[in-house]
């Protein structure tokens, strides 16, 4: 099994949390549900859970029209997508053209989906704003095609295509998606919002502080169990004072490779769960009782 079954590269992607999430789902009897991600991005974790039988089906959502178009094209027209990939030269001229398509098309389409994929595979760390691998004059040690293994990518797309009846796709704001899917029974959410501190540079859509706050209130009202991951900052910790909080280490590959500490917050169903990978954070100090003399 490759590290991620996703054809997309995503900084901070959660495919690396497969073992931990599989354990969380299995030990809590939540492994036969619809597994739903409101911020799907590369969806590497969701796909692997589906392929390994830990989710009955997966519901993916992403508001970015490019990301949505990519998944929609791969799910609806996998053969066409593979043909397009195989017949497209990986050159600077093509990069400039795909960048133009990505910049100018604002509504979902096959062309936008392919342009998003092309930029993701040829840009530094897969980031739209990262610039082309090797630089515009291709003078770097690595060239723009170094992450574009066509055969490997085609086999990932074929595999996803085989599971398309078990994958549903949405292009909504995350909160609308959460509310809609939460009206169903037997769902489990994995919520990986844009980072609080680094979000704006990494993805096309990003949150401002008020969005994180509103999201926290929507999440707190969910009926179905949920797992939330974030960057570990006091601003986020403060939004989830009454929930179970853990920290864990994750490898990033934006710029220099490094290990960062992230936060995992969970609903009460996961109260008893423990793993060597997770460090339980103490509950916040009880507020002083102002009425005491
Ligand atoms: C942190 S990334 C998710 C990474 C993903 N968990 C993975 O492993 O690849 C955040 C994603 O949320 C999407 N996004 C940002 N704001 C959104 C919103 N308001 N509603 C839905 N999706 C949003 C972005 O387009 C981006 O793909």
Image: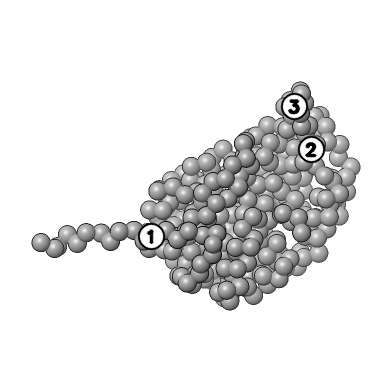
Q: Earlier in the sequence, mark 3 or mark 2?
A: 3
Where is residue 157? Give x, y as percent. Answer: 80, 55
Q: Calculate the distance from the C-alpha at mark 3 to the C-alpha at mark 1.
A: 47 Å
Residue marked by disc 2: 146
> What is the number of callouts on the image?
3
Q: How packed is label 2: few (under 14 Cα within 10 Å), some, or many (20 or more)?
A: few
Where is residue 221? Give x, y as percent. Answer: 44, 66
Q: Is residue 47 left or right of residue 202?
A: right
Q: Give the mark toward the camera: 1 or 2.
A: 1
Q: Nearer the viewer, residue 243 or 19?
A: 19
Residue marked by disc 3: 140
* Residue at 68%, 56% in the rendered image: 44
Q: Nearer the viewer, residue 49 or 93?
A: 49
Can you tell which quarter of the image residue 240 is in? bottom left
Where is residue 68? Give x, y as percent. Answer: 68, 52
Q: Is residue 66 left or right of residue 28?
A: right
* Residue at 60%, 68% in the rendered image: 23
Mark number, residue 282: 1
**Furthest residue toward left:** 293
* Residue at 68%, 65% in the rendered image: 49
Q: Calculate the distance from the C-alpha at mark 1 to the C-alpha at mark 2.
A: 44 Å
Q: How packed is label 1: few (under 14 Cα within 10 Å), some, or many (20 or more)?
A: few
Q: How packed is label 3: few (under 14 Cα within 10 Å), some, or many (20 or more)?
A: few
Check contact, mark 3 vs mark 1: CB within 8 A: no
Where is residue 175? Give x, y as percent. Answer: 51, 58
Residue 26 seen by the camera: yes
Q: Earlier in the sequence, mark 1 or mark 2?
A: 2
Q: Nearer the viewer, residue 75 or 13?
A: 13
């Amino acid at each position: 099994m490759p590290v991620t079954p996703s054809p997309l590269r995503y900084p901070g992607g959660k495919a690396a949390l497969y073992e931990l999430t599989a354990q969380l789902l299995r030990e809590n009897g939540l492994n036969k549900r619809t597994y739903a991600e409101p911020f799907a991005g590369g969806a590497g974790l969701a796909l692997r859970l589906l392929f390994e039988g830990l989710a009955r089906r997966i519901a993916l959502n992403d508001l970015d029209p490019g990301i949505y178009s990519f998944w929609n094209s791969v799910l609806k027209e996998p053969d066409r997508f593979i043909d397009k990939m195989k017949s497209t030269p990986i050159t600077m001229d093509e990069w400039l053209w795909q960048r133009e398509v990505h910049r100018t098309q604002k509504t979902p389409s096959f062309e936008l989906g392919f342009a998003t994929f092309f930029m993701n595979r040829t840009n530094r760390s897969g980031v739209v704003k990262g610039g082309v691998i090797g630089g515009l004059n291709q003078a770097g040690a690595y060239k723009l095609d170094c992450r574009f293994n066509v055969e490997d990518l085609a086999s990932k797309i074929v595999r996803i295509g085989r599971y398309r009846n078990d994958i549903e796709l949405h292009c909504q704001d995350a909160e609308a998606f959460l509310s809609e899917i939460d009206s169903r029974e037997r769902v489990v959410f994995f919520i990986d919002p844009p980072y609080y501190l680094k979000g704006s540079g990494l993805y096309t859509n990003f949150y401002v502080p008020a969005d994180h706050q509103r999201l926290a209130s929507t999440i707190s009202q969910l009926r179905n169990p949920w797992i939330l991951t974030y960057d570990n900052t006091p601003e986020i910790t403060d939004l989830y004072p009454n929930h179970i909080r853990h920290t864990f280490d994750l490898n990033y590959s934006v710029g220099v490779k490094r290990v960062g500490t992230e936060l995992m917050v969970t609903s009460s169903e996961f109260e008893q769960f423990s793993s060597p990978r997770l460090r339980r954070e103490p509950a916040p100090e009880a507020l002083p009782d102002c009425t005491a003399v």
